Amino acid sequence: MGKVVFFMETIDEVVMEVCNSMTPKMDDKLLAELKQTLYIKLNTYNVERKSTELTVCSDMKLLTMFAQAKLLEGKSENTIQRYVDIIRPLLQTVNKDISQIETNDIRCYLYEYKKQRGISDRTADGMRRIYSSFFAWLFAEKYIPENPMLRITPIKFEKKIKKVINDEELELLRMTCKNKRDIAIIDTLYSTGVRVSELINLDINDVDFDAKK
């Protein structure tokens, strides 16, 4: 990304500014002497144009800041990692200053991604929601002048109601288990509805057997 650079005044401009500020207090003769003195003093130094650089946050730094904000909101690390894994390729592929990314850039990226990867409409809409969250945050934090996601409408997909297994099917599953550990996994999944990824991350120390929670 680029840098915004501000240049300090030249010697002439400095002299003029000082003299103008002193005009109400000095007559023409004194002003002339002041101007001459300033030129003499300033020219005894090696004066160069200096710049004060205001470095604009890089795209990846903004992505990291977004992830930190979401963690602070209580999102899980797995969810945040998924956000990052989906947003980063968009930024890399579009390859524009983040403040210059337009609606059509995102729309075309989603279209090509869906076409090449063969993902479902449900998955594509999930990506759209993540992009919406990211750009809404950028706009709210004033890192971009406008939110390019506002003109991208939700992607329609067929909502399928998942079939719930009955008691007989559950018992058949339990009968295939070879040990108590496998039975505990099946019963936990069925009773709580947790995701497999959440089940994998469970630790026995997370369970309070006395309080039964």
Image (tube, grey):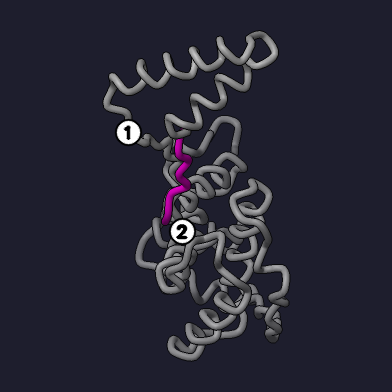
The residue pinned by badge 2 equals 84
**Across the whole image, how many numbered discs are drawn on residues?**
2
Q: Amino acid at mark 1?
A: Glu
Is residue 177 placed above or below 161 in the rendered structure? above
Disc 2 to disc 1, how far (Cα)? 44 Å
The picture places residue 129, in percent across and down from the top left corner, at 63, 67
- Residue found 49% across the figure and 91% down from its top: 115
Q: Which residue is mark 1?
A: 48
- Earlier along the polypeptide chain: callout 2 or callout 1? 1
Near mark 1 (Cα within 10 A), the count class, few <14, some 14-19 or many ≥20, is few
Q: Give me the disc on residue 80.
A: none
Q: Quadrant of the C terminus?
A: top right
Q: Nearer the viewer, residue 179 or 146?
A: 146
Q: Is residue 169 visible?
A: no
As drawn, 209 above or below 157: above
Segment tinted magenta in the rendering: 1-8
Q: Secondary structure at mark 1?
A: loop
The residue lying at 55 percent from left, 68 percent from top is 101
